[in-house]
Image: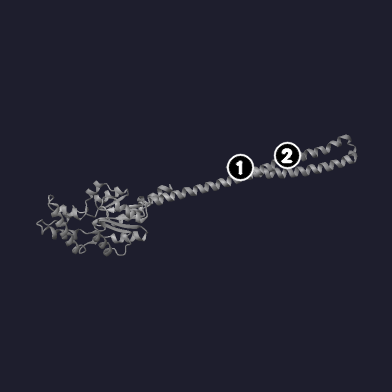
Amino acid sequence: MTKKQRINNTLKSGVFGILTAIVLAVVGYLWVNATQLLVDIEGFGLGKMVLWFPLVGYLVMGVAAIVLVYGIFQLIRGFSAKNKHVEKTEEVKKNQQDVLATERSLFEKGRIKGVIFDLDGTLLNTIEDLTDALNTTITVFGYPEKTTEQVKAVIGNGMRNLVKGVINPEASEEEIETILKAFLDAYAVSYQNKTAPYDGIHALLKELNGKGYLMGVISNKRQEYTVELIKKIFPDIPFVDVVGDHEDHPRKPDPTTTKLIIQEMMLSSSQVILVGDSQVDVQTARNANIPVIAVTWGFRSVEELTEANPDYFADTPADIFDIVMDINRKTEELLTN
């Protein structure tokens, strides 16, 4: 029997007791009056025995009084229990609502709402313009031309390191600076010639934007090139911030800039995921304490990326959207089960 059923039974017994008391009181009253009439006319020959008849009525009325008290007590007890049950039920409902609110809050904290992208090898295929500018420069200084594959092997950690990776490893700082300046001058002229987004990237960004996801870009490419390429190629995508290599912040894999973009998004680290194509990007995500998707169409081989141990792999831009959706779905299922 449930508590609610017990309360209802208590209330019913109280009502039944009061009704019974009323009936007994009426019967007792009528009995007293009827027998009193017998006493008044000297009992119709029943003698002194008739004097006891009214006492039976008074006894019945006494029982009625006791039953009445019992009925009233049961009603009070029942209504008191009912009120407590209602209060408890409301408290339970409130606690359930609080739990649901807490679960929703946890879900929102664990739900991906922001995506930070690397630029070269992730959003844009910049390798041909980089290779052309690099070869234009280093051949002047007596170095042989490099293939795009050779350039891919040393790209991703800033322009200076790119230059150092294709010239004499024992070159002096003065020579490095001279070649770097010439390379930057050459790249400033040609960096938009052949650079283009990878197939499916624009559609991905539009879909993420349409779903309300916040997006940012962080690159070890010079700030001016990074910003100009984004403005030219993705003018319709409202990135929260686009940050390249500049003196105000250290380069990746330092997490400083990544954390700043997360702050600008007004999200927590658990709500943001990084997308990149290199070991540097994976390490950046680790340093910023956020998950990372490694794309396989960029400048690093799958074997190199596997060694970096990213959280997810994406073979196409559409995979990125699917991964984000899957993370959010699993987070919600975890909290609702």
Q: Which colour scheme is used?
A: one colour
Q: Is residue 249 above or below residue 32?
A: below
Q: What distance separates the C-alpha of mark 2 from that of mark 1?
A: 23 Å
The amino acid on which the numbered mark 1 sits, given as a three-letter code, is: Arg
Foreground of the two, 33 or 173? 173
In the image, residue 20 lies at what x, y percent? 72, 43
What residue is shown with label 2? 66
Crowd band around label 1 with a 10 angstrom C-alpha radius: few (<14), some (14–19), many (20+): some
Residue 102 visible in rendering: yes
Residue 274 visible in rendering: no
Foreground of the two, 7 or 183? 183
Q: Is 5 left or right of 129, judged from the image as shown?
A: right
Quadrant for residue 206, please give it: bottom left
Quadrant for residue 248, please give it: bottom left
The amino acid on which the numbered mark 2 sits, given as a three-letter code, is: Ile
Q: Nearer the viewer, mark 2 or mark 1?
A: 2
In the image, residue 254 lies at what x, y percent? 27, 50
Mark 2: secondary structure = helix
| Residue in the picture at 86% in, 35% down | 49
**Can you name the residue that lies furthest to the top here?**
48
Q: In this view, does 79 lie above or below 221?
A: above
| Residue in the picture at 25% in, 47% down | 308
Quadrant for residue 189, please give it: bottom left
In the image, residue 137 lies at what x, y percent? 13, 59
Q: Residue 103 carries which label?
A: none
In the image, residue 31 lies at what x, y percent? 81, 42
* Quarter of the image where the N terminus is located: top right
Mark 1: secondary structure = helix
Choose the circle earlier in sequence order: 2 or 1: 1
Q: Which mark is residue 6?
A: 1
Q: In this view, does 108 lie above or below 57?
A: below
